[in-house]
Amino acid sequence: MEERLVFSKSKDDKTNQQIDMERIPNHIAIIMDGNGRWAQKRHLPRVAGHKQGMQTVKKVTIAASELGVKVLSLYAFSTENWKRPSSEVSYLMQLPVRFFSTFVPDLIKHNVKVTVMGDITKLPESTQKAVQNAMEDTADCNGMILNFALNYGSRDEITRAAKQIATEVKTGKIDVGDIDENTISNHLMSEQLGEFADPDLLIRTSGEERISNFMLWQIAYSELEFVPEHWPDFDGESLENAISLFQSRHRRFGGLKNQ
């Protein structure tokens, strides 16, 4: 059994822990929270936090890939984020352009494939183009999947799935009696992730303990971790700490521990 030495709990707690490299969660989803507060604590404009957060995405992506994570899903922009000030939204819309223009070569080097879930048709044309190019450029990579949730909301996703299923029933493609959990899962935006569609571990940074309309169906049995670091302070060590805690838990999926 291969193990890696990490520091547990937080960067200030130097209790040595071992990560079992054979039990790395297949799918890790992260709600990247706290960019604005990180900037405000430093008397910087909120957009400075988003800029720094983009660098964190790069670091955490490489760290996750090297650990053997199969899917890393990042909540980049929600259907509710349009309510933010227009100047901040405009800056956020430019981040994918800047991110992919510099990072795609590294993604290809690490054999990372980019996928996106969400209604990207509502994004500015330049943002859509950057996203589409990144997916095309990494299409042949067969290592970790870096899955961005862009203009994504889980209630919107489930509503769209319900409409699609209803249409298929109406046209006779499927029968009402045949609808089950798999039917719903296969109509969600995460269907493209195949067997790893459901996160094993959901992390939210910045200390907030909310799900914020992220993958509500898929996280039914995910382990949840709410960590104090703002997203710009999160790094590879933070990720390993979260995985160490994940491995200390026993996932029962509704059964009994000794079964």
Image (spheres, grey):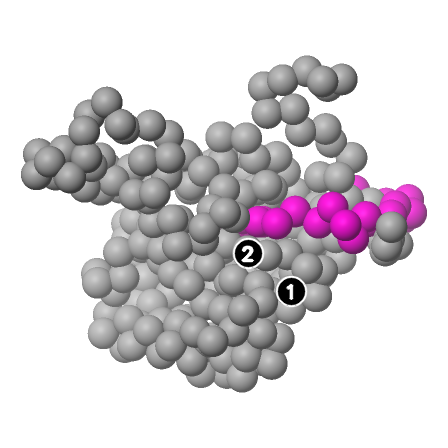
User: Residues at badges 1 and 2 in contact (C-beta under 8 Å)?
Assistant: yes
| Mark 2, secondary structure of its residue | strand
- The answer to whether residue 101 is above or below residue 225 is below
Left or right: residue 76 versus residue 157 is right
Give me the disc on residue 65: 1
Can I make out residue 89 in this image? yes
- The residue depicted at 51 percent of the width and 62 percent of the height is 146
* Location of residue 70 (image quadrant): bottom right
Q: Position of residue 151 (x, y in %)?
A: 31, 55
* CA separation in Å, label 1 and label 2: 9 Å
Q: Position of residue 104 (x, y in %)?
A: 50, 79
Residue 8: in magenta span = no
Three-letter residue code for mark 1: Ser
- The residue depicted at 62 percent of the width and 75 percent of the height is 110
Residue 30: in magenta span = yes
Q: Which residues are magenta?
A: 9-31
| Mark 1, secondary structure of its residue | helix
Q: What residue does disc 2 label?
A: 72
Left or right: residue 117 versus residue 175 is right
Left or right: residue 83 versus residue 28 is left
* Quadrant placement of the C terminus: top right
